[in-house]
Image: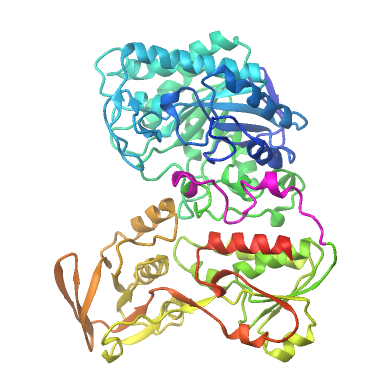
Amino acid sequence: MFSPVKLGEMTLNNRLVLPPMSINFGVDEEGFVTEQHWEYLKARAKHGPGMIVVGGGAVHKSGLDLPRMPRVWHDKFIGKLSRLVEELAPYESRLGMQLLHGGRQAYLAEKVAPSPLPSLGVVREIPRELTRNEIQDMVLAHARAAGRCKQAGFDFVEIHAAHGYLISEFLAPLSNLRDDDYGGDFTGRTRFLLEILEAIKQETGPEYPVGVRINGEDYIENGWDLYQCLMLAPILEQAGADWLHISAGIYGSFPITIPSMYAKHGCFVHLAKAVKQTVQIPVICVGRIKDPRQADAIIANGEADLVAMGRAQLADPALTEKARKQEFSRIRPCIGCCKGCIDRALALEESTCVMNPEVSREYMLGELKPASQSRRIVIIGAGPAGLACARLAALRGHHVTILEEQAQAGGLARVAALAPGRGEINDMIQYYLAENKRLGVDLCLGARVDQATVQGLAPDKIVLTTGSLPAMPQIQGLFDTEMEMHTVLDAFEPSAPLGNNVLILGGGVAALTLADHLAQNGRRVVVLNRFDHYAPEISANDRTYLRENLKRPEICLYKRVVIKKFFDNGLMFEAQGQRHLLEDFTDLVLAEGMKPMLEAARVVENLGAEVFTIGDAKSPRTLLDSQTEADELGRSL
């Protein structure tokens, strides 16, 4: 991974790529990049990835993918783009711009596309079909945008022809129904991309590096596929592409473009490997690659020439440097939750990261500063919020002790990680435990949390992160049944005495992942959700994979449930206008939300120390919320 590689006339000092990502920040209301954007990039560039691609620069007003994405459709934007280049100039990373037109997936009321067909997911409005003259305008828009990038000082540009955006729409039979020479057969559907590449080369000169990002698979029926990609790759090489960046998926496909923790690491690498057999130019791979040792092996095995690690570098900006030093245990891991990054971007909010809430705030936070005076900090609770807060407080020079009544650290995250496909949640806990050990934090497991114990530590400040417990739903007749009753936390334990037929009351992520867990262990499960939506607290990408897991005969899901009556071995309920009777069930699991644990608050009263409460101990919240709160408190203690 740390060997040099040449892309056209450009040499990189290593093969790690920070790929373009939709972050939806660092661009003002008029479309100019701001300090927020370049400080985010500098936080990563100073650690030395070989290549950084700014994503994605909108080449035309009709193609704006997100409100806060860089614009490159007018000369007036060159000045601020030059400033971004200047800010990153001191670092060795090569800096480029991705050229993007959102097509039918753009976040605009009026969209354009090769054919008047709506996107299959996320945005659904019917686009207007481009005329032949407009297609030529779009070719010219890409070329002129590339020229502006060169003028601004970018080392290269990369054409975005993947992920179901405009060029990708021209490539796929599913989205291109044209009967002119920009549609129909393979030659017609690839014409638009090839004309763009040719026009850019004419605009920038043949020596200016230009790459192309294309899908190896759309993963949708009648979409672009690997067979067509392998036909196109050598044509692009012959047309002057200096590298190919192979990705996958479009809005509405499965697997999806930005896969969650359920997808295997390196899930799209096989596509790059196949393309690499057809061309001599370098090939970049991508797809849930979070461990630099895996990246190194991919290159060593000849599967790709460079490796894109996007979310991994959101989670840890210093990943490149830590990998170079082989400090693998110190790399802050992406857990594949998609909650802070793409979920927020698609909600038109600023992206951030569960593992790294500093993302988007680099320009405000700067380097972590030591505390003006070292204090004794006692944190009660070793869940994610407590561990994260302890790490930051220790980094700032405080003496930190964590008291945890349980024999294991991790809190609810430890239980969440027991569910199928969600084991990477435990990566977060293991990272914090290793970091806190390295920083000298005293972790006391199985500790007695009483007033004498806390007072004996003479704390200056106390942080309560004791988490939450399952709430008890108020449903008439709930306690009249003879079914065995369990909380969702108890039901996850391997020793839980559950029978073969289980009812789960709840529709959140805890209820659904428990259903998956129990079904994979041979039980029949019915989930009764009294609300409108399933697992609203997790990201859409994560939920998509989870819902796919639940498509199995052992699991039945109902929502908008109204329970009418409990029986000794079942119940009667209505759901969406239909009445149902469930019988022969042995166990009932309560998974309808959580309530804060408040006992520790009474323990620390009147000890003379300043007390802070964060995370679920304050009120049940998402992992993103609790980690952000822990980050902010750790910086201020």
Q: In which quarter of the image is the C terminus?
A: bottom right
Magenta span has 346?
Answer: yes
Q: Main secondary structure of the magenta part?
A: loop
> In this rendering, would 422 be left or right of 357?
left
**Residue drawn at the location 41% of the way across and 52% of the way down:** 540
- Residue 121 in sight from this viewpoint: yes
- Front one among 400 and 323: 400
Residue 554: say if magenta.
Answer: no
Please state the horizontal and vertical placement of residue 247, each as a whole percent of the image.
47, 35
Please tell me which residue lies in front, 215 or 405.
405
Counting every numbered tag in the picture gives: 0
Picture coordinates of residue 435, whole percent (x, y): 72, 63
What residue lies at 35% left-to-right and 29% top-to-bottom? 111
Q: In which quarter of the image is residue 604?
A: bottom right
Q: Which residue is drawn at 51% across and 21% down?
A: 73
**Residue bounds of the magenta highlight:** 344-371
Q: Where is residue 606 in the image (x, y as percent from the top left)?
A: 71, 87
